[in-house]
Amino acid sequence: MTEIASLVLLVGVALQAAGQSTNPATDPSVPPLETIVVSAPEPRYVAPTLRDRIGRIWAPVYLNDKGPFRLVLDTGATHSAVIPRVADLLGADARTNRTVRVRGVSGTAVVPVLRVQKMDIGDLVLEPAMLPVVADVFGGADGVLGNEGMRDKRIVIDFKRDSISVKRSKRERPGPEFRTLPTKILRNYLLAFDMTIGRVKTTAILDTGAPQSLGNMALLEALKRHPEDLPKAEVVGVTLDVEYADRVAMPTIYMDEIIVRGAHMSFGDVHIFKHWNLTREPAILLGMDIIGVVEQLIIDYRTRELHIKVPR
């Protein structure tokens, strides 16, 4: 058995008990966030993408020249994975007798592995690729597109035009309408950057596969906020383990010159925070509830920078 490092995905962190949509853009019961702000060269490959009902990004991916399969772009996943339906479509040639241990936000599980000769989206081509087969918890998507093979890549996500491009980074500088956030690399090319919540300096891990952000208890204690009088939110990952988190109204969030007000987040020292030894200092998995308020997001793994364009 071969172990793959942390495969992280949050599925329906908040409002699970009520069965509500958690995307502010589509759910009128969720007040919109207030965002304040005190072109890249044309890529070789552009593909249509979709925001699903909980705000995640679906990217088209070809496996053995079949597809495209709709994978959730997940910067918080260190490895791509697919659901059993994809394994059935790829057939016996892709099956192996190997298993791997995957690590989700709420636990670990041993799952079977597929071997595909080629996996490609834009300039990203993996030959061959090993893909864990995980539970169908993606709300209509066929799996997740993780960050393996991204070390020299530049991902451009245009939420306004519904497009995504993956190409080799040439260290391009964005236009003046973008704000640049320097990042640091945690284990297995997870992108993290510093942000301030209220007056608390926090390590934020970019997790585009998470519909909602999730903070650790050290952050909640530093904010001196009290949980809302609501049922605890369920935190469910690809391993189907369930943990619980408290919902809290947030103070103003500062990401460099970008300011976000009106957010609510969940808090709990779930499995993945413990695995990463991120329980003592304030930390947050920054999901699509915050990331999704921007107009464009450029992730440059080569320069280790995030470029963000916020709607006027």
Image (spheres, grey):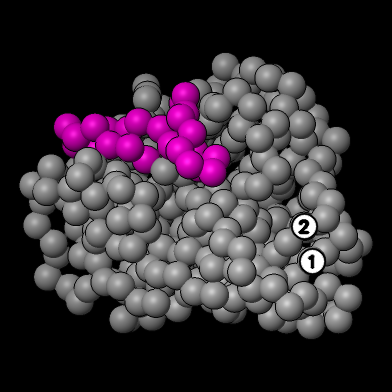
Snapshot quadrant of residue 214: bottom left
178 up-or-down from 215: above or below = above
Q: Residue at x 37, y 24 (%)?
A: 257
125 up-or-down from 152: above or below = below
The local secondary structure at tag 1 comes to strand
Residue under pointer 1: 115
Q: Which residues are magenta?
A: 181-204
**Drawn side of residue 225 relative to residue 129, left or right:** left
**C-alpha gap between disc 1 and disc 2:** 6 Å
Percent across and percent down for residue 85 are 73, 81
Residue under pointer 2: 129
For the residue carrying disc 2, how many other residues have a C-alpha within 10 Å: few (<14), some (14-19), or many (20+)? some
Q: Amino acid at mark 1?
A: Arg
5 up-or-down from 308: above or below = below
**Closest to the observer, 87 or 225:** 87
Percent across and percent down for residue 109 are 49, 74
Q: Main secondary structure of the magenta part?
A: strand
Q: Residue at x 37, y 40 (%)?
A: 204
Q: Is residue 199 magenta?
A: yes
**Closest to the observer, 294 or 277:** 277
Percent across and percent down for residue 260 are 33, 39
